[in-house]
Image (cartoon, rainbow, N blue to C red):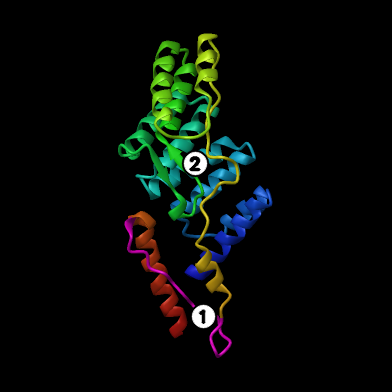
Amino acid sequence: MLYTEFLRLWDEAVKAVDARDWQGALSKLNQITEPTSRTLFLTASAHLALGQLEPAIQALDQTIAKDERLAVGFFQRAGAFMMASRLEEALNDCISSQKHMRGNMVIDYKQLGLRYKLYSWQVLYNTAAAHSRLDQLDKARDILISASQEKGRGGRGGNMEVALDMISRGEVLPVLLVPEGQVFRPRKQDIEQLGERDFLGKPKVHYIIHTDISLCSLNECHWNRKMIRDIIEKAQS
């Protein structure tokens, strides 16, 4: 699959998400023969919006297989596991998400195309939510207190007082997820270049090589190199 075709399908899937056309987004994504962690995350988001938990979890499994250090991938799958009552797996993913936060209070995914900041207190909150579902209320309360302290040092959203009150009443906590519609998007520059044409009137092929590891996981960089070879071979044929 040429990178330009991959990029076009990814962009069309994002536009479908913006229009809340989840099935349309999945239709475009299913045409991508070599998905990346970011397009697979988008696939999972569409399934979650449709209430399709198992396909969402499967897509997140593939997301994490492509990028094993993607903290937000583990965070999202933990939430999906809780919704599917797979609580031990949810706890394991919370631990993995916290591990891949690497001691940071927040990870901003804007550079990767996701307009979302993952805070460490959110990971702790979901850990408490999983324990509340396991009826381990004392542990849930202790973790919530830690989450409240983390949130106090920086972070938005979430009412810890309400959450602690719910635990005191023996109630389970609602799950935190990346908000619906917040997905990884292709770079605006790359999409704009898709429409450019050279002086002969043929589509001009552009590819931006990301050397910054924060912009390109090792698996995706390998995939990108393959796409470059395909583009060159196509142009020479």
Circle 2 crowding by C-alpha within 10 Å: few under 14, some 14–19, many from 20: some
Pointer 2 or 1: first along the chain? 2
In the image, residue 22 sits, relative to residue 82, either above or below, namely: below
The image quarter containing residue 13 is bottom right
- Judged from this view, the residue extending furthest toward the top is 169
Q: Which mark is residue 92?
A: none
Residue appearing at x 56%, y 85% in the figure: 202
In the image, residue 225 sits, relative to residue 93, either above or below, namely: below
Residue appearing at x 55%, y 19% in the figure: 162
Q: Nearer the viewer, residue 52 or 113?
A: 113
Q: Position of residue 129 (x, y in %)?
A: 48, 22
Q: Position of residue 97 (x, y in %)?
A: 38, 36
Q: Which residue is mark 1?
A: 204
In the image, residue 156 sits, relative to residue 217, either above or below, namely: above
In the image, residue 160 sits, relative to residue 213, either above or below, namely: above
Residue 88 shows in this picture: no
Q: Main secondary structure of the magenta part?
A: loop
SS of the residue under disc 2: helix
SS of the residue under disc 1: loop
Residue 57 shows in this picture: yes
Q: Which residue is mark 2?
A: 58
Q: Amino acid at mark 2?
A: Gln
Distance from disc 2 to disc 1, alpha carbons, whole Å, reads 36 Å
Q: Is residue 121 magenta?
A: no
Q: Amino acid at mark 1?
A: Lys
The image quarter containing residue 226 is bottom left
Circle 1 crowding by C-alpha within 10 Å: few under 14, some 14–19, many from 20: some
The boundaries of the magenta stretch are 197-213
The image quarter containing residue 8 is bottom right
Say if mark 2 contacts mark 1, CB within 8 Å. Answer: no
